[in-house]
Image (cartoon, rainbow, N blue to C red):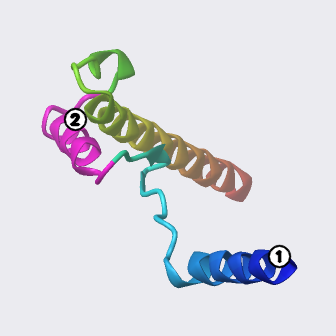
Amino acid sequence: MIRILVAAGAIALVGSFAAPANAQETFHGYDCTDDCSGHEAGYDWAARHDISDERDCDGDSRSFNEGCQAYVEEQADDANRNSQSDDENDNEDSEEQ
């Protein structure tokens, strides 16, 4: 009986290594259910329409909305980085005078 349990455990262990686990795909930090096509569509739509407010990402599809939100978040992050860079340049200019 013990041999059967050990053999079954070994088979289960080997089987878990042989079959790769399905890695969850993500799109800009959002989990995709099957593929990320809904997220990509929402992101592309937001880019084409220059969406800057997440409240405009209110379609019927969760993945589409998350893609749209990812675009808005990315634009806000870019704007913050540019603003910080401009502030640093302004500080350097004022120190040189």
Which residue in the protein does label 1 denote? 1
Percent x, y for residue 69? Answer: 37, 32
In the displayed structure image, the side of residue 93 where residue 21 appears, left or right: left
Q: What stretch is highlighted in magenta?
A: 34-51
Q: Quadrant of residue 15?
A: bottom right
Percent x, y for residue 43? Answer: 26, 42
Q: Which amino acid does label 1 sit on?
A: Met
Question: Alpha carbon of mark 2 to alpha carbon of mark 1: how far?
Answer: 62 Å
Q: Quadrant of residue 73?
A: top left
Q: Which amino acid does label 2 sit on?
A: Ala
Does the magenta-highlighted stretch encompass residue 42? yes
In the displayed structure image, the side of residue 19 where residue 8 appears, left or right: right
User: Is 83 above or below relative to 66?
Assistant: below
User: Is 40 above or below relative to 6?
Assistant: above
Which residue in the protein does label 2 denote? 46
Which badge, 2 or 1, comes first in the chain's sequence?
Answer: 1
Percent x, y for residue 3? Answer: 81, 84
Q: Which residue is drawn at 21% across and 41% down?
A: 47
Q: Main secondary structure of the magenta part?
A: helix
Q: Which of 2 and 12 is in front in this view?
A: 2
